[in-house]
Image: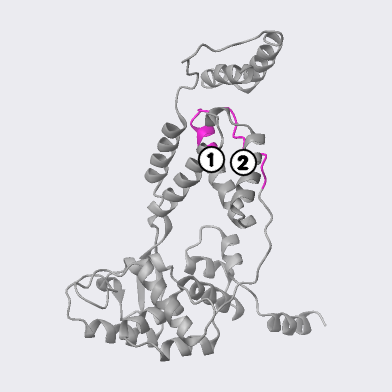
Amino acid sequence: MKDTIIKEIEQSLLNHLDNVQMEMLHSTLIRCLDNVNITVKDGCNIAKYSNEELIDKFIIAKNIEGCSSRTTDYYKSTLLKLNSLVDKNVMHMTTDDLRDYLVRYQKINNCSKANIDNIRRNMSSFFSWLEEENYILKSPVKRIHKIKTDKVVKETYSDENLEMLRDNCDNLRDLAIIDLLSSTGMRVGELVKLNRNDIDFENRECIVFGKGNKERPVYFDAKTKIHLRNYINSRNDDNKALFVTLDAPYDRLQISGVEIRLRNLGKKLGINKVHPHKFRRTVATRAIDKGMPIEQVQHLLGHSQIDTTMQYAMVNQNNVKESHRKFIS
């Protein structure tokens, strides 16, 4: 309780004292309250805001920043789970509290290190926001470092896989989807947002809206152009969406619809793990493998950080061997 009182006093003075003064205040409070017993009256609520109120304020801030509903939903579910398992106001949670929570969460859910690190990053965003907004003095997540995860070599589609997928499509729409994903490397969320008039057939490009509603151009090849035109010309509906359901009332196709169609096609053909994101990884890998500068691949995929691009791409080991012979041997 003593620590809680000290934190409340310090937090109430955050906007009025500099760092040196705050350190002096902290040491003075520790010294003066060392031998003092403090009890709180029944019904007395020290915290000014409840955890739910602070979480809601954080989500509102992220919405204003342009985060997608998918991202904010993930933030909210992570933080509400934290709230349900740690019986403290977030303004009083310590680094040890959060470390214990991560350990317990992993044991209870038997989840991967990558999953736990995602939770850590979500908590870091929340507590950093609390610090910036002067709700807390310092984020307790700062001392919880990135969790090292096993580096797994993720699969890409081979040329044979792509041709099998194309040859076994039973409708023009799915063929156009496969071509557009494998040609542009766009996200599936970007694909389903496209409208017919977004497609510039003459220049074989279109503008997509990526994460944070950032616009960027993507480019497709001649084969994709032909299949897209064939699909659009075959439609009788007036929906502005580029891709719609196969049956009336021809609603805009959703992410889940694309994922299900590709997954079922992959099972039918015996191709392992067929999903939209695998096309994106394949595009990145091939672009780098063929000598495309990493900065251009970054721009093509719409990554804000080049490190993200490097995680998507895997270098062909045969090319490494040839380069070694050329430049080193």
Label 1: few (<14), some (14–19) or many (≥20) C-alpha neighbours in 10 Å:
many
Relative to 20, is 148 above or below?
Answer: below
Regarding residue 329, the answer to whether it shows in the image is yes
Q: Earlier in the sequence, mark 2 or mark 1?
A: 1
Q: Residue at the spot x=72%, y=79% of the render?
A: 320
Query: Where the N terminus falls, by quadrant?
Result: top right
Is residue 142 highlighted in magenta? yes
Q: Amino acid at mark 1?
A: Leu
Left or right: residue 253 versus residue 183 is: left
Q: Position of residue 204 (x, y in %)?
A: 36, 79
Q: Residue at the spot x=60%, y=72% of the render?
A: 154
Q: Secondary structure at mark 2?
A: helix
Tag on residue 101?
2
Label 2: few (<14), some (14–19) or many (≥20) C-alpha neighbours in 10 Å:
some
Q: Which residues are magenta?
A: 127-145
Q: Secondary structure at mark 1?
A: helix
Is residue 323 highlighted in magenta? no
Q: Residue at the spot x=53%, y=66% of the render?
A: 298
Tag on residue 82?
1
Asked if labels 1 and 2 touch by Cβ distance under 8 angstroms, the answer is yes
Nearest the eye: 306 or 67? 67
Nearest the eye: 69 or 88? 88
For residue 24, what is the image quadrant? top right
Query: Where the C terminus falls, by quadrant?
Result: bottom right
Q: Amino acid at mark 2?
A: Tyr
Q: Residue at the spot x=66%, y=50% of the render?
A: 146
Q: Position of residue 236 (x, y in %)?
A: 17, 81
Nearest the eye: 78 or 14? 78
Relative to 225, is 193 above or below?
Answer: above
